[in-house]
Amino acid sequence: MSFAALFFYLFATVTVASAFMVIAAKNPVHSVLFLILAFVNAAGLFVLMGAEFLAMILVVVYVGAVAVLFMFVTMMLDVDFAELRDGFLQYLPVGALVGLIVLVELVLVVGTWSFSGAQSTVTATAPIPADVTNAEALGRVLYTEHLLLFQAAGLVLLTAMIGAIVLTLRERRAGVKRQDISAQVARGPATAIEVVKARPGEGLSEGTV
């Protein structure tokens, strides 16, 4: 077994085991930590494939931002997991059916790809020169052949971000303090400063000016 094959099986095994632990761990913080481990090992697989730019993006964006954000949100939210588990058995048959369908589809796809022996009919329209780096080759493909699709993906993400802001930013929700910029800018000495006269040996009481 070659050195590259050994690392491939190592990274692949840890990735699959970490992905299983993401859904099997009882503690949500542990699930996020296993997700980070899966991302790191997937980045190792990208490096073995020669896609070092994708490996760097996976570590910087997903591990450094998304997974850490998941962890902070999971730790800060006071979620009653006991209440969530109450209806677990109610949806178990439907979840098992959906999981079985997905498993059958994966087996059919992998089996067809492995045993059909058919050659791929997709050919590159513009071969990438050998002296071009991985990041430059990816940039050429994204910003030339698939520019419109790349811009459409950006619009979809922008729409999702605006939708999330609209759903969470409710003006009339009770108990939420809002920042009023105009009121802060319009403050003057009369409203910002309170002059209090205290007698010697006495403390300050409310309303003493």
Image: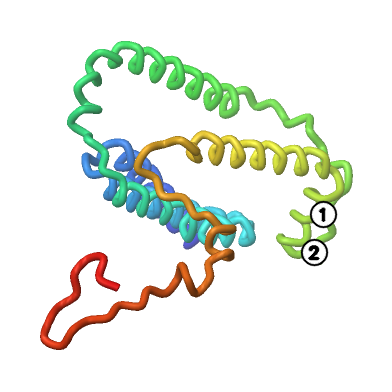
Say above or below: 34 vs 194: above
Indicate the amino acid at tag 1.
Arg
Does any portion of residue 1 appear in the rendered image? no
The quarter of the rendered structure image containing the N terminus is bottom left
Indicate the amino acid at tag 2.
Val
Where residue 104 sits in the image (x, y, percent)? 45, 17
* Neighbours of disc 2 within 10 Å: few (<14), some (14-19), many (20+): few
Question: How is this picture coloured?
Answer: rainbow
The quarter of the rendered structure image containing the C terminus is bottom left
Does any portion of residue 32 appear in the rendered image? yes
- Residue farthest bottom in this picture: 200
Q: Which of the 4 image quadrants contains residue 28?
A: top left
Q: Which residue is depicted at the point 50% across and 38% down? A: 171
Q: Which of the 4 image quadrants contains residue 90?
A: top left
Q: Mark 1–mark 2 contact, CB under 8 Å?
A: yes
Q: Which mark is residue 140?
A: 1
Where residue 14 sits in the image (x, y, percent)? 36, 50
| Camera-nearest residue between 92 and 112 | 92
Where residue 127 sits in the image (x, y, percent)? 85, 50
Say above or below: 112 vs 60: above
| Secondary structure category for the residue under label 1 | helix
Which residue position is annotated with label 2?
Answer: 132
